[in-house]
Image (cartoon, rainbow, N blue to C red):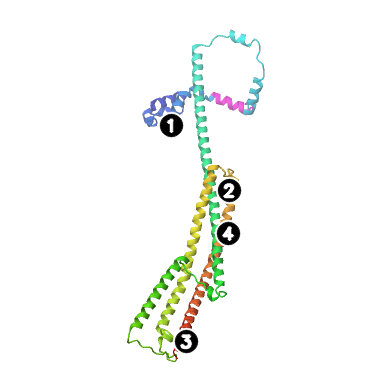
């Protein structure tokens, strides 16, 4: 099939202006072959559209006259007439009259065969179009199922996030309450129940404390033995009124300033380190909750316990988003409260350190006074 055949077919149909067309100029329409939709349409057009399908000017004029006179039936009227004719029984002699009619001529038979072939091709095209529609419907159904599955996954993820926020908030509240109770018990604790904060485990701290105590004991014993074995050992009495004596009054102003600077550094560092520690605990609990929720979601997916109604899923998603917003606001408020509490912790630690240093000085002076009285 080429452009020359297309032009000849248009001329046979009586299309206006086709006498000036050149067939070779339209050969490019058939370059892609039979698989091209345009080529398929042109083949169907040249096989099925004949001069019998084209109305003449006279037929169009007669139709317009009938339409103006109101003698053209509407589609509804045609359907009603078809239903009425189908309900009329056939006459007994109709078959006999048909048998008496002459057989169609070869030309009429050829025209009927051509019309039958055209109708068969139309039927095949309608069936092909129907199959395409069914395929498209199946694809849309798969896409809808995939979208619903994705929506269910998003809803489950939102529920998991909300659960993690709630659990993290509860853990944070319990940690803050425990710290507050510790701080409140500072003033109520007795000397035998002295309390302090440490980032080291109790067992490790006790091991290090025992190690330090053993080293200190060994050092004292060594010094005592060496002093006792020296012949040139001298024993003098301490004068409490002598302010230059470092054993009585302390290390001096320079050491005091260094201690103040170190105390300020620790005071500035303590809130940040405590905040990092609490954030680490929160993150650890959050990861544990995420793992547990993922296991629950996986079990629900295997058992098919997820809701399938799209409206219910949207409503659940909206409720979870609102709950998530409330949890975020509450979490921000708890974080601000935690920072204020950590600032108070730093001040309490500074106070406890200063008071401990002062008590140490008093005990040291009392020790020397006692030893001096024993010597006297």
| Secondary element at image label 2 | helix
Q: Position of residue 2 (x, y in %)?
A: 38, 27
Residues at discs 1 and 4 in contact (Cβ within 8 Å):
no
Q: Residues within 10 Å of mark 4 (few under 14, many from 20)?
A: few
Disc nearer the start of the sequence (4/3):
4
Q: Is residue 252 above or below residue 341?
A: below
Q: Which residue is mark 2?
A: 314
Q: Quadrant of the N terminus?
A: top left
How far apart marks 2 and 4 lie (CA) works out to: 19 Å
| Secondary element at image label 3 | helix
Residues at discs 2 and 3 in contact (Cβ within 8 Å):
no
Residues at discs 2 and 4 in contact (Cβ within 8 Å):
no
In the image, 363 versus 328, the foreground residue is 363
Q: Main secondary structure of the magenta part?
A: helix
Choose mark 4 or mark 3, whichever is in front.
3
Q: Residues within 10 Å of mark 1 (few under 14, many from 20)?
A: some
Q: Which residues are magenta?
A: 58-72
Q: Which residue is mark 3?
A: 370
Q: Is residue 105 visible?
A: yes
In the image, 86 versus 29, the foreground residue is 86
Q: Which residue is mark 1?
A: 38
Q: Which residue is mark 4?
A: 326
């Amino acid at each position: 099939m080429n452009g020359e055949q297309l032009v000849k077919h248009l001329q046979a149909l009586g299309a206006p202006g086709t006498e000036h067309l050149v067939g070779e100029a339209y050969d490019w329409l058939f370059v892609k072959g039979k698989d091209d939709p345009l080529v398929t349409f042109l083949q169907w057009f040249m096989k099925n559209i004949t001069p019998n399908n084209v109305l003449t000017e006279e037929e169009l004029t007669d139709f317009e006259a009938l339409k103006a006179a109101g003698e053209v039936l509407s589609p509804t009227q045609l359907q009603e007439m078809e239903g009425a004719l189908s309900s009329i029984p056939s006459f007994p002699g109709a078959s006999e009259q048909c048998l008496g009619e002459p057989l169609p001529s070869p030309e009429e038979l050829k025209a009927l065969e051509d019309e039958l072939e055209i109708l068969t091709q139309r039927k095949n095209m309608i069936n092909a179009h129907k199959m395409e529609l069914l395929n498209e419907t199946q694809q849309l159904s798969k896409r809808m199922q995939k979208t619903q599955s994705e929506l269910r996954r998003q809803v489950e993820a939102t529920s998991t996030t909300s659960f993690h926020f709630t659990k993290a908030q509860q853990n944070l509240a319990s940690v803050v309450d425990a710290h507050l109770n510790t701080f409140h018990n500072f003033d109520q604790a007795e000397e035998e129940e002295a309390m302090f904060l440490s980032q080291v485990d109790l067992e490790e701290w006790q091991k290090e404390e025992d190690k330090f105590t053993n080293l200190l004991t060994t050092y004292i014993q060594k010094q005592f033995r060496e002093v006792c074995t020296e012949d040139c050992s001298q024993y003098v009495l301490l004068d409490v009124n002598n302010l230059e004596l470092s054993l009585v009054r302390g290390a001096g102003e320079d050491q005091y300033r260094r201690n103040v600077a170190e105390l300020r550094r620790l005071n500035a560092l303590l809130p940040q380190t405590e905040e990092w520690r609490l954030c680490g605990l929160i993150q650890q609990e959050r990861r544990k909750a995420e793992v547990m929720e993922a296991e629950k979601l996986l079990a629900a997916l295997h058992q098919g316990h997820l809701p399938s109604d799209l409206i219910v899923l949207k409503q659940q998603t909206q409720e979870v988003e609102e709950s998530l917003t409330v949890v975020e606001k509450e979490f921000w408020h708890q974080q601000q409260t935690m920072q204020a509490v950590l600032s108070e912790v730093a001040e309490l630690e500074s106070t406890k350190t200063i008071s401990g240093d002062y008590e140490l000085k008093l005990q040291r002076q009392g020790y020397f006074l006692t030893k001096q009285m024993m010597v006297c």
